[in-house]
Image: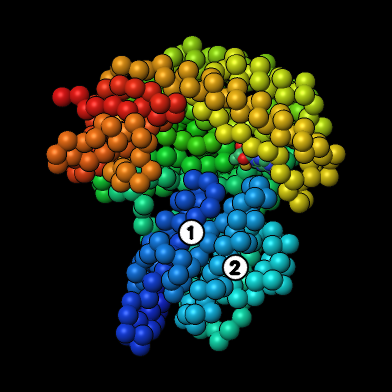
Amino acid sequence: MEEFAERQYEYIDKLREMIAQRSADLGRAMTACVVTFGCQMNARDSEKLTGILREAGFVMTEDENADFVIYNTCTIRDNANQKVYGRLGVLNGYKKKNPQMKIAMCGCMPQEEKVIAKLKESYPFVDLVFGTHNLYRFAELLYETYQRPKGMLVEIWQKEGEIVEELPVERKYSFKSGINIMFGCNNFCTYCIVPYVRGRERSRDPREILQEIERLVQDGVVEIMLLGQNVNSYGKNLEGGISFAELLREVEKVEGLKRIRFMTSHPKDLSDELIRVMKESKKICRHLHLPLQSGSNRILKAMNRGYTKERYLEVAEKLRREIPDIAITTDIIVGFPGETPEDVQETIDVIRKVQYDNAFTFIYSPRTGTPAASMEQVPEEQVHREFDLVLKCVQDTARAQVGRYEGQVMEALVEEVNDGGNAPEALKELSASEGEVLLTGRLSNNTIVHFPGRADQVGSLIMVRLKECHGFYYLGNQEE
Ligand code: 5AD
Ligand code: SF4
């Protein structure tokens, strides 16, 4: 693995020289902007892109009118793609005014052949395109892009390559970090494009994961999120076998680490051992994201989810029984091919029984190449009607769930200063007294709490009284 990283470091050196030269010629610093679409995996990948750009000498900016802009894309639903195409058009306008500008696209979208064809046909001003499997080659690809007079450099690997994790990373938050424990997915849910664009499941060596966590903690990180498409099957392809629950036990031992989160759990692989480890742990957060997708056995089968409504409910009940303060959140798809109003009632039944703390509800989006895309689609008006029903039910249960801690004192990790721009009205009333600002913190169960405090408290764990619940967040006060 190391030789792959070494080669990239050589390209980072070359880039640094080249960018310094260009900045000198321009008489100003070269700027770069990374725009992230999609999930936590992409967010982590963007930190890798940012790390390399910064090392190469770019000044990072959030303004897309920059010398280098890269879109790290998502293709899980079609609206994610449409958003990207729309914004590429805007970038072209900037590029016409700044001949220096280079535009790149990476992530899940370019893994689809039809996307490459569309870029070549309608977006020829894009300079660099690469996918999910060769992200670690970014430095080299970027250098090559600058060496070419013109034209689109496209490098897409159809198959997963090595896991290369030794490259620069710039974390968005100094005190918390995602960490990849596995890549890809073998489940092939019939609606999902992830196995096609992220490849087969590969787990990282546990020793490497632990070393990375230790390094992060030394660097000031107190909360980590273990990332994978299906963390519950972690370790299955590793020699010597280690389960996800065993990995968690090891991570728990890392001194100085305060909180552990993970994403995403597949209900079919959730073991009793994992529930036990969570229950006994002092560090694993009281939150489990457990995608349901549908409550109808017929639809679950057509989705190839590998569990029944009854089995899911059993797992959820066990979680609530063993860990009473756990928050359970979920993903639900409405409008999967063949779904009837009766099927949707089954989903609503599960929502009522599980009483989710939060749920993301999606309208089914056909993805080219997946089995469900060629099944008979549900009429649009029906889908919208059902979607509204599901959403209403989710909102009602979530409000009641989130509010159950009103008046209690809980520990929050302070994540940021709330600049007030999007501060809720009720929060402004709390109006921080002199010298104080409004802070936003996250409870172990993932609920957000806003409270007055000092800016230098960002990154610390603080006891907060949850005074008032406002739907999905709390207003609070620090406990002396
Ligand atoms: N259409 C709608 N939602 C989808 N998801 C995955 N694929 C699709 C699709 N084709 C949802 C699932 C998954 C979440 C990340 O996105 O609910 O859990
Ligand atoms: Fe997609 Fe299913 Fe894999 Fe999740 S488990 S990434 S929904 S195929």
Q: Where 152 falls versus 275 (above or below)?
A: below
Give coordinates of residue 171: x percent, y percent.
36, 53
Of residue 94 and residue 183, the one placed in the foreground of this image is 94
Q: Amino acid at mark 1?
A: Val
Q: Residue at x 37, y 76 (%)?
A: 30
* Mark identifier at residue 89: 2
Instruction: Please rate how many residues cluster around mark 2, counting C-alpha atoms within 10 Å: few if below 14, some from 14 to 19, many from 20.
Output: few
The residue where tag 1 is placed is 35
Instruction: Indicate left or right for 81 with 322 as reference.
Output: right
What residue lies at 82% left-to-right and 32% top-to-bottom?
338
Judge whether 225 appears above or below 122 on screen: above
Q: Could you tell me if residue 210 is visible in this image?
A: no
- The reply, left or right, for residue 105 in relation to residue 366 is left
Residue at 73 percent across and 48 percent down: it is: 367
| Element assignment for label 2 | helix
Q: For mark 1, give the secondary structure.
A: strand
Please tell me which residue is depicted at 85% across the width and 39% down the height of the picture: 376
| Vertical side of 368 occupied by 63: above or below | below
Name the amino acid type tagged 2: Gly
Nearer the camera: disc 1 or disc 2: 2
Classify mark 1: residues with Cα within 10 Å, few (<14), some (14-19) or many (20+).
Answer: some
Instruction: Where is residue 381? Give x, y as percent.
Output: 77, 36
The mark that comes first in sequence, 1 or 2, is 1
Of residues 445 and 201, the one drawn nearer to the viewer in this rendering: 445
The picture quadrant for ligand 1 comes to top right
**Cβ atoms at labels 1 and 2 below 8 Å apart:** no
Hey, which quadrant is residue 340 in on the image?
A: top right
Quadrant in the picture for residue 436: top left
Estimate the spatial distance between the alpha carbons at disc 1 and disc 2, rounded to whole Å.
15 Å
